[in-house]
């Protein structure tokens, strides 16, 4: 009778790891490598979550910075109202007794030579016949 040799068949397991195999030294790095090799998906998920958190923080910071630039660029409501009031404040003037259109132009526009502007704005046909108390547009 011929004896058959028994051979042990061992299954080789392929370990999927992002890290290359290293010599087995008992160090912190070796323990971390062993954990990563044992549970690779948990570490990948952990890194993904960490990356998402960092991306969220960066995005929030960018929004805050952009918001600050928008606030600096747009004037406040009160400033816009004041600008509108300034435009409308000296739009009209009342011609006083003894005052001419030249005098009104000097007072309101800074120079008497601007009297044709008042004549054109009010569509006056005869500027000499304007009565005192007449409301005239000056701007």
Image (cartoon, rainbow, N blue to C red):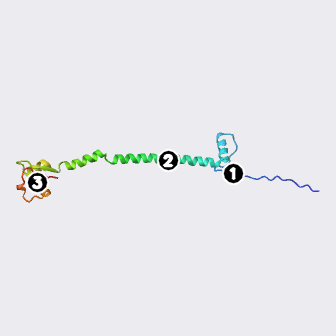
Can the viewer see residue 122 in this picture?
yes
Query: Residue 103: x and y, percent?
Result: 8, 49
Disc 1 packing (10 Å; few <14; some 14–19; many ≥20)? few
| 134 sits to left or right of 85 | left
Report how far apart the C-alphas of labels 3 and 1 lie in the structure: 95 Å
Q: Which mark is residue 115?
A: 3
Q: Quadrant of the N terminus?
A: bottom right
Mark 1 — residue? 15
Residue at image coords 44%, 47%: 62
**In this rendering, which labeled residue sits more in front, label 2 or label 1?**
2
Q: CA gap, disc 2 to disc 1?
A: 33 Å
How packed mark 2 is, by other alpha carbons closer than 10 Å (few <14, some 14-19, many 20 or more), is few
Rendered image: mark on residue 56: 2
Give the CA distance from mark 2 to mark 3: 64 Å
Q: Mark 2 or mark 1: which comes first in sequence?
A: 1
Tell me the SS state at disc 2. helix
Residue 110 visible, this angle: no
Dividing the picture into quadrants, the one containing residue 124 is: bottom left
Work out whether residue 32 or residue 54 is closer to the camera in this orientation and state it.
54
Disc 1 element: loop
The percent position of residue 85, horizontal first and vertical second, equals 23, 47
Residue 92 position, x and y percent, is: 15, 51
* Marks 2 and 3, the one that precedes in the sequence: 2
* Image: 43 above or below 122: above
Please identify the residue farthest to the top as the structure is shown.
Answer: 27
Q: Judge the density around disc 3: few (<14), some (14-19), many (≥20) Cα neighbours within 10 Å.
A: some
For label 3, the SS is helix
Residues at circles 2 and 3 in contact by the CB criterion of under 8 Å: no
- Kindly indicate whether the residue at mark 1 contacts the one at mark 3 (C-beta within 8 angstroms): no
Q: How many marks?
A: 3
């Amino acid at each position: 009778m011929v004896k058959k040799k028994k051979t042990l068949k061992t299954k080789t397991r392929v370990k999927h790891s992002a890290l290359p195999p290293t010599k087995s030294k008992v160090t912190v790095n070796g323990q971390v490598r062993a954990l990563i090799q044992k549970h690779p998906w948990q570490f990948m998920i952990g890194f993904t979550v960490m990356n998402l958190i960092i991306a969220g923080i960066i995005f929030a910071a960018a929004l805050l910075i952009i918001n600050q630039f928008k606030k600096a660029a747009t004037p406040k409501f009160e400033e816009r109202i004041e600008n509108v009031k300034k435009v409308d404040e000296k739009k009209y003037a009342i011609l006083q007794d003894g005052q001419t259109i030249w005098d009104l132009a000097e007072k309101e526009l800074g120079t008497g030579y601007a009297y044709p502007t008042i004549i054109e704005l009010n569509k006056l046909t005869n500027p000499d016949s304007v009565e005192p108390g007449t409301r005239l547009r000056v701007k």
